[in-house]
Image (cartoon, rainbow, N blue to C red):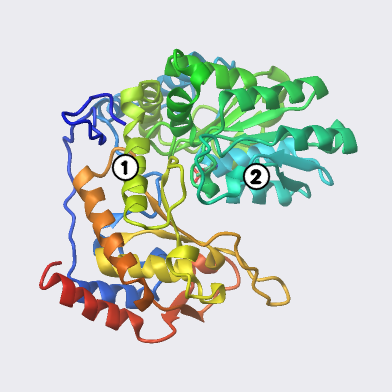
Amino acid sequence: MSKVTFFGGEQFPLEMHKVRIIQKLTLLPIEDRLAAIEQAGFNTFLLQNADVFLDMLTDSGVNAMSDLQQAAMLIADDAYAGSATYTRLYDKLVEIFGMDYFLPAHQGRAAENILAQVLVRPDTVVPMNYHFTTSKQHITVHGAEVLEFIRPEGLEVTSYHPFKGNFDTDRLRQLVAERGADAISYVRMEAGTNLIGGQPFSLENLREVRDICREHGLTLVLDASLLADNLYFIKTREEACRDMTIPEITRAIADCSDILYFSARKLGFGRGGGICIRDEETYKKLRGYVPMYEGFLTYGGMSVREMEAITVGLDETMDEDMINQGPQFIAYMVNELEQRGVPVITPPGGLGAHVDAMRFLDHIPQPEYPAGALAAAIYLCSGVRGMERGTMSEQREPDGTEPLADMELVRLALPRRVFTLSQVSYAIDRIHWLHQNRTMVGGMKFVEEPEILRFFYGRLAPVNDWPHQLMAKFRQDFGDSL
Ligand SMILES: *Cc1c(COP(=O)(O)O)cnc(C)c1O
């Protein structure tokens, strides 16, 4: 796992950085945690951060900056036009990706909006390895259909396949043969597929997709938001790339793509986003939308301070020692949970550990939201905040029926460079305890169910008094420990 061999052969992650700014955390006693989750309607989105010990809700916009990023923020050039900050960011992007044109946007979905305005034609399809929520919405709102061509192993919860994010190129060939290239607006490839556990694609697979696109004149768009993790996995898992450097792998990936966009809330350890474009004609078509939706072309809705931080963060992304902490900690967490019998998505991906609530709480029927119940129970027994990714995150059909999700997951995101191994070990310990006591956890029901985005704002109640009983068992087992 780490590059250091430990005496005795045991392996665990070893950070190649040290912490120089800290934020104090509080761990409330379980009685106060129960009050907090009750007040939040048993929905982890509605918890106050002050009541959370380890916030594993997301990896978006909460990654830790380095000393060099903080220092760079002080030299930000706050000019509306012609800012030196913009030039530094632009030069870094050209250096790394080798594409001549760049358009800034305030975050990833804003880049998706601009791309969809120009590239998505109604009554066409957009094939992709797997969708992301906002990517899909921007495509469907313009009247096109998303087709998911993930390979079958991508949807298996337990697997040892190293590249579960791979695109099924046979299905792409078949689609082109059946419907013709004109029926396809573009092909989208997502690095580190977010919604199926941060699973990577291989460079070999991306090159196959590129070959099909070139042969039929199709535009290949890369969503590079989770590129950092995907780079690490290619470097460590793909035999043919073992001797390539991270910048070489990055350039090889970019060379396959016509357009590359990213959320800098993940890529570059900052907050922002943007689009890199290879050809001038496409750039000119996209350009007009930036002043309309984002801001002038040299900032696109980002603060210049964040842009400076992203420039340095992109440079750090080219350094394996700076990007390996996330995937190594996640691997540690997934492997330790698996060894303790806790069902998790394997192999470990980027982004976080994903607990399989369908198996963890196999006594709870899906309409009683096993993943929602598990997220609430994990907070109750640990103060760790995860995110429900199951049936609660789906939306009801217009006739009121409730579609059941393919998977019931609780995502425990590990923001990059934020937590220590002892904090991760604590989370593993409490989830292990919960698993041993899993039959005590019961289902949930909505008491307030908004029509849209119910997982954000909805309020729930337990179907019986399981939270109090679980708390009593916790006190019995842990005494007066927090
Ligand atoms: C987060 C994310 C986005 C959207 O980015 P925001 O900055 O949150 O708008 C798009 N694609 C992927 C793969 C993501 O992970």
Give the side of residue 365 with respect to residue 48, left or right: right
Task: Please tell me whether residue 334 is drawn above or below residue 480 in the rendered image.
Answer: above
For mark 2, does the 10 Å Cα neighbourhood hold few (<14), some (14 to 19), or many (20 or more) residues? few
Which residue lies at the image location 34% right of the left edge and 70% below the top edge?
A: 377
For mark 1, does the 10 Å Cα neighbourhood hold few (<14), some (14 to 19), or many (20 or more) residues? many
Q: Is the N terminus in the top left, top right, bottom left or bottom right quadrant?
A: top left
- Label 1 SS: helix
Q: Is the C terminus in the top left, top right, bottom left or bottom right quadrant?
A: bottom left
Which residue lies at the image location 49% right of the left edge and 80% below the top edge?
A: 445
Name the amino acid type tagged 1.
Answer: Tyr
* Residue farthest toward the front in the current orientation of the protein: 8
- The residue that mark 2 highlights is 152
**In the rendered image, is residue 133 in sight?**
yes
Q: Where residue 222 appears, x then y in whole percent?
A: 61, 31
Instruction: Quadrant for residue 59, please give it.
Output: top left
Q: How many marks?
A: 2
Name the amino acid type tagged 2.
Answer: Pro
Task: Please tell me whether residue 425 is drawn above or below residue 31 in the rendered image.
Answer: above
Q: Where residue 436 appears, x then y in whole percent?
A: 31, 67
- The residue that mark 1 highlights is 332
From mark 1 to mark 2, how far is it between C-alphas? 26 Å
Instruction: Quadrant for residue 418, please give it.
Output: top left
* Residue farthest toward the bottom in the current orientation of the protein: 464
